[in-house]
Image: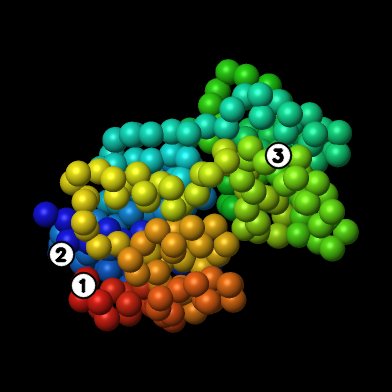
């Protein structure tokens, strides 16, 4: 029987600056698995972006794309893509504002236009530059977009304009260069709720580790929310427990504290 569900954000939580899982975290994951605790990747990333992590860690239950894509023990169980009418409107508005958009699903990413901003973003994510396929969404599901509105004072009005014009979408600021966009109501928390509703996980205690704004719905959904020491101030304020930062074994320290490893 599963003793606990343990959800991990990736960047600045489970991963180091080189986007690798530190040895201490790998050992902690193995110890969780040995203790019948289920480690779960809970991320804004899509499956193809974390496939190497799945192979490295043996973690096969994932909440991807900020809750829009769910995998349970290797099985792809749900997907909640953004509707095509909303994508048409979003891309038309982005084109009118000369804003690039990246479109993601479980197996690939494309952009509607290639710019210096898209190049910088994918270099930062250590990913190849995506193909330019503006009509991609007409024949493929899109679980998530990146809307390239930077986090700068002169861009705040544009951010507000997009948010107001698309109440049927949810926007997250998770980086300096772009906004995450998913279908309305899709959060890490909704993905976790779907897992909690499964009979095999009924009543199982839940823990979550995170650092950023899109981790707040995850924190609200679990029994014990753990903020990394490097987390944003509002994330620290929402946590039940605060641990060391992502570079100083914050995860195994808390897992030992709660007797999970």
Image check: 15 left or right of 183? left
- Residue drawn at 48 percent across, 34 percent down: 80
In contact (CB < 8 Å): disc 2 and disc 3: no
Name the residue beneath numbered marker 1: 261
Q: Position of residue 91 (x, y in %)?
A: 74, 31
Q: Is residue 168 above or below residue 208?
A: above
Name the residue beneath numbered marker 3: 166
Mark 2: few/some/many CA within 10 Å (<14, 14-19, 20+) = some
Name the residue beneath numbered marker 2: 35
Mark 1: few/some/many CA within 10 Å (<14, 14-19, 20+) = many
In contact (CB < 8 Å): disc 1 and disc 2: yes
Cα–Cα gap, marks 3 and 1: 44 Å
Q: Position of residue 120 (x, y in %)?
A: 72, 51
Q: Nearer the viewer, residue 178 or 26?
A: 178
Image check: 96 left or right of 202? right
Image check: 253 left or right of 117? left
State the image quarter where residue 194 is shown. top left
Q: Secondary structure at mark 1?
A: loop
Q: Secondary structure at mark 2?
A: loop
Q: Secondary structure at mark 3?
A: loop
Q: Is residue 5 above or below residue 254?
A: above
Q: Nearer the viewer, residue 89 or 118?
A: 89
Q: Position of residue 217 (x, y in %)?
A: 48, 58
Mark 3: few/some/many CA within 10 Å (<14, 14-19, 20+) = some
């Amino acid at each position: 029987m599963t003793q606990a569900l343990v959800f991990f954000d990736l960047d600045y939580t489970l991963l180091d600056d080189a986007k690798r899982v530190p040895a201490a975290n790998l050992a902690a994951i193995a110890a969780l698995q040995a203790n019948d605790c289920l480690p779960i990747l809970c991320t804004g990333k899509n499956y193809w972006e974390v496939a190497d992590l799945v192979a490295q860690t043996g973690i096969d239950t994932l909440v991807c794309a900020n809750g829009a894509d769910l995998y349970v023990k290797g099985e792809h169980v749900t997907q909640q893509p953004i509707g095509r009418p909303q994508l048409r409107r979003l891309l038309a508005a982005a084109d009118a504002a000369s804003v690039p958009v990246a479109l993601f699903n479980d197996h690939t990413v494309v952009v509607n236009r290639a710019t210096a901003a898209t190049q910088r973003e994918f270099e930062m994510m250590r990913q190849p530059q995506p193909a330019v396929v503006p009509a991609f969404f007409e024949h493929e599901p899109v679980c998530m977009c990146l809307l390239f509105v930077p986090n700068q004072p002169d861009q705040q009005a544009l951010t507000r304009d997009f948010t107001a014009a698309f109440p049927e979408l949810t926007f997250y600021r998770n980086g300096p260069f772009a906004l995450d966009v998913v279908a309305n109501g899709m959060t890490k928390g909704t993905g976790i709720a779907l897992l909690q509703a499964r009979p095999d996980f009924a009543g199982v205690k839940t823990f979550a580790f995170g650092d950023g704004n899109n981790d707040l719905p995850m924190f609200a959904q679990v029994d014990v929310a753990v903020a990394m020491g490097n987390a944003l101030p509002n994330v620290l304020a929402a946590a039940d427990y605060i641990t060391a930062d992502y570079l100083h074994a914050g995860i195994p320290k808390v897992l030992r504290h709660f007797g999970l490893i």
